[in-house]
Image (cartoon, rainbow, N blue to C red):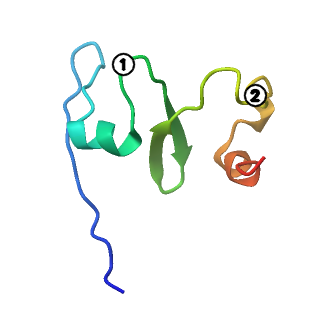
């Protein structure tokens, strides 16, 4: 089975700490205007994905469960 090669995309940070997501990233995440992103800080780096719509995450109020280990442990709930 051939190994999948990682693709790389770049963007710059503006003076207001803003950036534009490259088109291939937007397409891969299936995101558009008004969608929210989730940033997860892990030992391996930063994971960015499309955030679930507000109100669909029953654990959002529990800030003590906000770490990457908890994200992994409770991902299937």
Q: Which is more toward the observer, 3 or 31?
A: 31
Q: Residue at x 78, y 30 (%)?
A: 58
Residue 18: x, y in percent?
A: 29, 19
Q: Which mark is residue 63?
A: 2
From mark 2 to mark 1, how far is it between C-alphas? 27 Å
Mark 2–mark 1 CB contact (< 8 Å): no
Q: Residue at x 36, y 87 (%)?
A: 1
Q: Residue furthest top?
A: 16
Q: Which is more toward the observer, 43 or 7?
A: 7
How many other residues sit within 10 Å of disc 1, few (<14), some (14-19) or many (≥20)? few
The residue identified by callout 1 is 33
Is residue 33 positioned above or below 74 on the image? above
Residue 32: x, y in percent?
A: 36, 25
Secondary structure under tag 2 reads helix
Q: Residue at x 71, y 30 (%)?
A: 57
Position of 67 with respect to 48 (left or right) is right
Position of 55 with respect to 28 (left or right) is right
How many other residues sit within 10 Å of disc 2, few (<14), some (14-19) or many (≥20)? few
């Amino acid at each position: 089975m051939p190994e999948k090669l990682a693709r790389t995309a770049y963007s710059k940070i503006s003076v207001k700490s803003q950036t534009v997501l490259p088109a291939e990233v937007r397409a891969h995440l299936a995101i558009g205007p008004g969608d929210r992103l989730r940033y997860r800080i892990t030992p391996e780096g930063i994971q960015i994905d499309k955030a679930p719509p507000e109100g669909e995450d029953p654990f959002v109020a529990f800030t003590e469960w906000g770490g990457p280990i908890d994200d992994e442990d409770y991902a299937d709930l």
